[in-house]
Image (tube, rainbow, N blue to C red):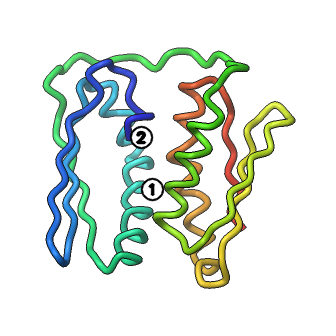
């Protein structure tokens, strides 16, 4: 979530756990960051919820994500895309790997950035292959805007 926000205030978050559930409450610092967190028609939030549901099932818990309106009601505009040859490869790769490890059992994550995009190839175990149909779109929905903000086109191929 930190990668989706641009305001220096970032976001406030609170995590409450019980033996059966995890509740994550998030409040972005600005309304522009709220729109980036939610995504167009709620796409980012739906993808995040789907991935966290899967991670929760793997841990035997139900995960709830709650958002609250930012304290600052001003609306920020998304900056124009600018390609950045020095985008944070290691940081983004680690973020994608950590996300996939939460959601899947022993996924393989490979980065090929020899072309004009950062192509991540995620190989799922046989246990998780039935979920590839929704995991791929969910992680692409989440990481596309992150790539936009750091200056690289991210494409994630889940197999």
Taking the spot 68% from the left edge, 19% from the top edge, the residue there is 84
**Which quarter of the rendering shows the C terminus?**
bottom right
Q: CA distance from mark 1 to mark 2?
A: 10 Å
Quarter-of-image position of residue 72:
top left
Q: Is the C-beta separation of discs 1 and 2 under 8 Å?
A: yes
**Which quarter of the rendering shows the N terminus?**
top left
* Extreme-bottom residue of the structure: 127
Q: Position of residue 100 (x, y in %)?
A: 54, 60
* Extreme-right residue of the structure: 114
Q: Secondary structure at mark 1?
A: helix
In the image, residue 63 above or below residue 14: below
* 18 to the left or right of 147: left
Q: Position of residue 115 (x, y in %)?
A: 86, 35
* 98 to the left or right of 124: left
Question: Which numbered circle lies on residue 33?
Answer: none
In the image, residue 86 above or below residue 60: above
Lower sequence index among marks 1 and 2: 2
Quarter-of-image position of residue 63:
bottom left
Taking the spot 41% from the left edge, 17% from the top edge, the residue there is 77
Query: 52 or 36: which is nearer to us?
Result: 52
Task: Count neighbours of disc 2 (C-alpha within 10 A) and say few if under 14, some if 14 to 19, many if 20 or more.
Answer: some
Q: Position of residue 145 (x, y in %)?
A: 53, 35
Q: Secondary structure at mark 2?
A: loop
User: Where is mark 1, residue-wise?
Assistant: 47
Task: Count neighbours of disc 1 (C-alpha within 10 A) and say few if under 14, some if 14 to 19, many if 20 or more.
Answer: many
Taking the spot 56% from the left edge, 50% from the top edge, the residue there is 96
* 5 to the left or right of 133: left
Taking the spot 40% from the left edge, 45% from the top edge, the residue there is 41
Number of callouts in the render?
2
Question: Which numbered circle lies on residue 39?
Answer: 2
In the image, residue 75 above or below residue 18: above
């Amino acid at each position: 979530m930190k990668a989706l926000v641009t305001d220096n205030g970032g976001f406030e978050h609170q995590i409450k756990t019980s033996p059966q559930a995890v509740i994550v409450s998030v409040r972005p610092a600005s309304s522009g960051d709220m729109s980036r967190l939610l995504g167009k028609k709620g796409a980012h939030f739906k993808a995040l919820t789907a991935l966290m549901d899967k991670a929760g099932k793997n841990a035997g818990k139900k995960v709830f994500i709650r958002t609250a309106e930012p304290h600052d009601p001003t609306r920020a505009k998304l900056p124009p895309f600018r390609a950045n040859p020095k985008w944070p490869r290691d940081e983004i790769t680690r973020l994608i790997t950590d996300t996939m490890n939460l959601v899947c059992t022993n996924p393989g994550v490979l980065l090929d950035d020899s072309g004009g995009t950062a192509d991540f190839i995620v190989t799922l175990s046989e246990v998780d292959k039935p979920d590839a149909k929704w995991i791929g779109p969910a992680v692409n929905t989440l990481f596309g805007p992150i790539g936009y903000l750091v200056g690289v086109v991210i494409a994630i191929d889940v197999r």
